[in-house]
Amino acid sequence: MTRHSPAYGKGAAAVALVATTAEVLAHPELDEGLLAPWERLRLTGIRVPGRRDDVVAARLLLRLCASRITGLEPRDVVAAQRCPGCGRDGHGRPYLPDRPGLGVSFSHADGLAAAAVGPGPVGIDVEPLARRPGPVSVLRRLLPKDEVDAACSEPAPGPALLRLWVRREALFKAGRDDLPLTEWTDQGRAAVVALAGADGAFAPPLSPAPAPRSGR
């Protein structure tokens, strides 16, 4: 698992972790039994095994981040979700009921997982380095047109559009557009990551990144 770099806020710390799904599921502190009954119930609706593993990994990684920042054991971290649109629990933005001052976020995509916990609103997004977010015509409807046009004008528009996508997703998950953004590439895991809100998050690495596949 990888860290993101040094200290956040006035003496407070934020934690962001990025890992492959396999790394998370093999971690000695984590197993599916840590998930709440409502989370395990939601897993029954996921029919694709790989996607199910990604979802489990992201939710477990959130607990590990919360453990690192609160001092609780991962099994003692209580996580919940609430939809800001309909106001119902069980889906939508994650939060820690027992730690209202902490923002939490998680992401998963094709064998990758990421999570962040820190003071105030936070959002994190991870995507495979090789992914392209979609046709430019569609992106112009989903993202600010001027930012899409700027990305398209770069020498490598595909990677630029992917970076724009993960940044916008991180801000969306944080629920605010005015937060500081940090973006980095995890070359070992072939992942692009964006973190909103927790400017300068830190978490010690827990295992080495696997060697990148040939040709990547």
Image (cartoon, rainbow, N blue to C red):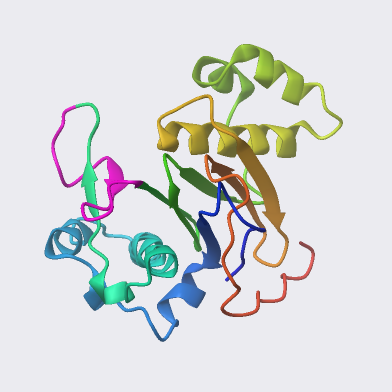
Closer to the camera, 73 or 125?
A: 73
| Relative vertical location of residue 65 with respect to residue 159 in this rendering, above or below | below
Judged left or right of residue 18, residue 38 is left
| Relative vertical location of residue 102 with respect to residue 47 in this rendering, above or below | above
Judged left or right of residue 43, residue 126 is right
**Is residue 43 a member of the stretch shown in magenta?**
no
Label count reads 0
* Magenta span: 86-101
By secondary structure, the bulk of the magenta-drawn segment is best described as loop
Closer to the camera, 37 or 152?
A: 37
Judged left or right of residue 34, residue 69 is right
**Residue 103 x, y percent position in the rendering:** 38, 46
Which residue is found at the position 72% from the left and 70% from the top?
Answer: 212
| Relative vertical location of residue 210 with respect to residue 144 in this rendering, above or below | below
Quarter of the image holding residue 76?
bottom left
Residue 110 visible to the viewer: yes
**Residue 56 x, y percent position in the rendering:** 33, 65
Quarter of the image holding residue 24?
bottom left
**Residue 145 x, y percent position in the rendering:** 62, 13
Residue at the far bottom: name it. Answer: 28
Which residue is found at the position 16% from the left and 31% from the top?
Answer: 87
| Relative vertical location of residue 117 with respect to residue 205 in this rendering, above or below | above
Residue 132 visible to the viewer: no
Which residue is found at the position 66% from the left and 38% from the top?
Answer: 163
**Is residue 92 a member of the stretch shown in magenta?**
yes
Picture quarter with the C terminus: bottom right
